[in-house]
Amino acid sequence: MAVPKVLLYYAFAPVADPEAVRLWQRDLCEGLNLRGRILISKHGINGTVGGDIDDVKMYLRKTKEYPGFKKMDAKWSDGTGLDENGLSLDFPRLSVKARPEIVAFGVPDEIEVNNKGIVGGGTKLKPHELDALVEERGDEVVFFDGRNAWEAEIGRFKNAIIPDVKTTHDFVRELESGKYDHIKDKPIVTYCTGGIRCEILTPIMKARGFKEIYQIDGGIVRYGEARGNQGLWEGSLYVFDKRISMNFAPDVALIGTCKCCGTKSNHMINCADKMCREQMVVCEECAAVDVFCEEHAKVTA
């Protein structure tokens, strides 16, 4: 019986020829009937793929044969389903690209990797280590969201700082704005979906004077798997596929507010303008009709 699975993964390691790795990855995924998104750069690989569990397992095993990817950080979750051709319903297509960065912070020359991964990143904390840090140092600890601001609308760590960013490219400008100078001497815990954005965000922050920087090992996914609804995380996790969001346990707290009717929801949609990429919290009932972001609502009014 086919079992749909989604694999979220990354590995930081020197890649001498990203284009050659791109072609290999494309052929590997096509041969295994997988869909998803994969980015390769001189710094490593970052991807999410979906398909039948046996095919995804084979993909992971083959990808780990590349010398720098042997210790790849990989996380599994349930897929929505497979179509009549055995292709994942969670992704519309397969996209494999070579880029200057595997996460687009806009500072590729600042990032240094070696065979052990990112150089100069934050101290990694397992879920129990994070809980212990907060228990020991209390309100002194600052949670700093390493995602786009709209992702935090349906889930975030308690009392976290949510930077005013719409894309990852905005982070450097935001950090250099001065608005976070007052926390530069505090213990800061960065977090993101699977941990990859914080791998890059933490050395960027350290280079700009933030002194005590931590990151959650494996990101929100690993913390949620360990703690469910009982830890410091609140709400649902936004994911970049057709599932839109995922929960770590039943009866999750709904912290998002529907843009249209004000009810609590973890359902997010794109602006109805096809050229707009803005995401909004809109409950499933209100999403039955076209909903526009504020900018495009003015145009259609």
Image (tube, grey):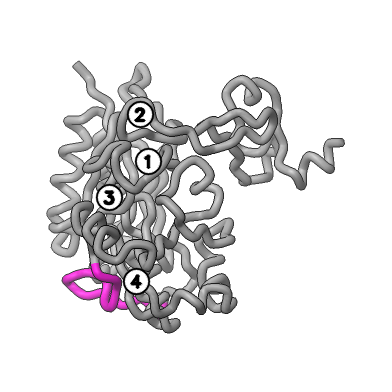
The three-letter code of the residue at mark 4 reads: Pro
- Whether residue 268 is in magenta: the answer is no
Of marks 1 and 3, which one's residue comes earlier in the chain? 3
Of marks 3 and 2, which one's residue comes earlier in the chain? 3
Of marks 1 and 2, which one's residue comes earlier in the chain? 1
Q: Quadrant of the C terminus?
A: top right
| Relative image position of residue 284 (x, y in whole percent) | 57, 23
Q: Which residue is mark 3?
A: 9
**The image quarter in which residue 6 lies:** top left
Q: Are marks 4 and 1 in contact (CB under 8 Å)?
A: no
Q: Is residue 228 left or right of residue 255?
A: left
Q: CA distance from mark 4 to mark 1?
A: 36 Å
Residue 102, visible in the rendered structure: no
Q: CA distance from mark 1 to mark 2?
A: 8 Å
Q: Which residue is mark 1?
A: 36
Single out the mark in the foreground, 3 or 2. Answer: 3
| Relative image position of residue 238 (x, y in whole percent) | 44, 41
Q: CA distance from mark 3 to mark 2?
A: 17 Å
User: What is the span of residues highlighted in magenta in the rendered image?
Assistant: 109-123
Q: Is 184 above or below relative to 140?
A: below
Of marks 2 and 4, which one's residue comes earlier in the chain? 2
Q: Residue at 61% across / 28% down in the picture?
A: 263
Q: Which residue is mark 4?
A: 187
